[in-house]
Amino acid sequence: MEVESAASNSNAKNQRRVGLIYDQRMCKHRTPDDDYHPENPNRITVIWNRLKLAGIPERCVLLNAKEAEDKYICAVHSKKHVNLIRKISSKRYDSKRNLIASKLNSIYFNEGSSEAAYLAAGSVIEVAEKVAKGELDSAFALVRPPGHHAEFDEAMGFCLFNNVAIAATFLLDERPELDINKILIVDWDVHHGNGTQKTFWKDPRVLFFSVHRHEFGSFYPANDDGFYTMVGEGPGAGYNINVPWENGQCGDADYLAVWDHILLPVAKEFKPDVIIISAGFDAAVGDPLGGCRVTPYGYSVMLKELMDFAQGRIVLALEGGYNLDSIANSALACMEVLLEDKPISGFSEAYPFESTWRVIQAVRRKLSAFWPTLADELPTKLTNQKAPPHILPLSFESDDEDDEASKIVSADFVAAVEDVVEPLLKLKVEDNHDKVTTASTLWRSELSKSDIWYATFGSNMWKSRFLCYIEGGQVEGMKKSCSGSMDRNPPKDILWKTCPHRLFFGRDFTQTWGPGGVAFLHPQSNSHNKTYMCLYRITLEQFNDVLLQENGPDHDLSSPLFDLNALNSIPNEGSFSVEAVKRGWYHSVVYLGKENDIPILTMTCPLSTIEKFKSGEIPLRAPCKEYADTLVRGLVEGNQLSEEEARTYIHEASAKTII
């Protein structure tokens, strides 16, 4: 059933027919004890109220939300997952609902979660079908919970069902008579749409485009899925496009540069029949999780430029966005574009960041084999137009001088967000800046007085490569630079040793080196093994900075990762797991003895990860040529092996299984 609005009267004959869905039943999904959570019912009610205040619903075709059928959801999710979400709000789950949620990544459940999830998925199907049929020109599904993180067999990142993926699959597989053969999904949420990407990984009918904060895998969902090298597989190769920001604060100029030089040229070649937008507004100014600065004007221009494709048949489905003023203003700006009854107002004189141009050029080079329109190098005159180097904000501020409320993130709000979504972002609050600086100065001063030997077994065996972690920069073959340490003094001494530990290579690719494995050291010793190690004598302060760069540069070093207490206890314990960077690959510090009464430390993966390598859950991979070359140079320049011997050493380490 649909409710006709003013869009159907005689005075609006030429007005676009724009659908709009909002249903308060989706507000029933909330935290079980009504604790604060950024993904809460206010998100959709504040948008709806802002739209009503502007008179938008009267100009739209209002649609009734309906629950999705299991058979359509099962085209994207496993039967086990669908059964869980269907039953999770029933009384039989009252005693175990919270326990189930606690085992998932950033998820909560209550008595209203099932209904809300089914309504969200069904609402996006409803508007997508009507747009595909031509009954509507475009539509906005104002839904929650969001969906783009939800994977085949798992809810995560506030998402229960992948609403957009379900709707796209429905159009392609369940409605062949509509002749929808190609769908462009644009995900402008600040977080990578990992679930949507995996759904269409091998499907050339769907061009999935995601622009998001990535920061070399340290930003949520904190993995490599969102890197630009992830382009799809088999028949879907080239139909997965990721634009991974290296930093926060990206705004209108950065996003519009990506539109002009990646998305729009590819969309022109792809010629989609329908466009579905995963419309998260957490890249908007003032968002407490996103840390970017897109304005309502920026969103309206991005949307307007997409309306030149697919005859303007566009569906927006709400994803993230946690600053209530920002999401309301941004959603209103998008609705006004869809209705085409108000000129876009605003301007942007800013230039993109240098890092933005770097990412754009990397994406274009990677995708040029699939999309000839991206083959040409961008002119230097264009890429030289760039903003000053970014400075990460100490607090999230709004650019809108008239909106004081969106400039202030209260201490209570920050505390609540940190409690609930710590994996998403470690918030930095301006009020605490002086305390953080003082604390950092104190521990750095203390740890700078203690020396350790840092034992390296991978690319850091080459001194020039290791100095990138101390002085900053990069060497030949590296695809990104290092930030360096606070104390940039070189190592006080260098020596070589061998240790009875197993060297092996694993993981598919890294942001620093690209495709191929990287070196790991088995944390347990074995007299049958022999690994060459280059030891650098550095301060414990420098070791903390190296540990951070190896595992996740987004962590706040107001306190050390590995302090004097850890240093004193590790000889007895043998190893120390650095919980603050446990998502990193090298968060296990291993004690290897002493040299000249100075502790020898290395960093590698924990034993739990070794088991995953053994089972095949995490792949063993030989290193790429560039990475292997750094090991060879380290071994040769360190007078340990000849080049031929070094390459044989690496080959043998790559070929053996883990025992």
Image (cartoon, helix red, strand yellow):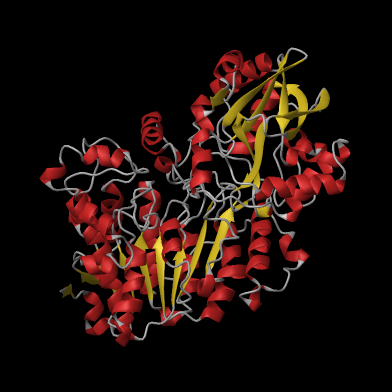
Residue 26 in the image: x percent, y percent? 22, 54
Q: Nearer the viewer, residue 252 or 483?
A: 483
Locate the C terminus and report the quarter of the image it occupies.
Answer: top right
Residue at point 23%, 80% (across, down)? 8
Residue 288 in the image: x percent, y percent? 44, 42
Residue 98 in the image: x percent, y percent? 24, 38
Locate the N terminus and report the quarter of the image it occupies.
Answer: bottom left
Image height of 39 relative to 592, above or below: below
Left or right placement of residue 514 versus residue 495 in this view: left
Q: State the image quarter where residue 568 is shown.
A: top right
Residue 353, can we see it? no
Q: Nearer the viewer, residue 502 or 405?
A: 502
Residue 282, can we see it? yes
Left or right placement of residue 390 versus residue 118 in this view: right
Left or right placement of residue 61 versus residue 241 in this view: left
Q: Nearer the viewer, residue 22 or 502?
A: 502
In the image, farthest residue toward the left: 91
Image height of 51 relative to 657, above or below: below
Left or right placement of residue 575 versus residue 95 in this view: right
Residue at point 71%, 40% (across, down)? 458
Residue at point 51%, 25% (across, down)? 432
In the image, farthest residue toward the front: 528
Q: State the image quarter where residue 584 is shown.
A: top right
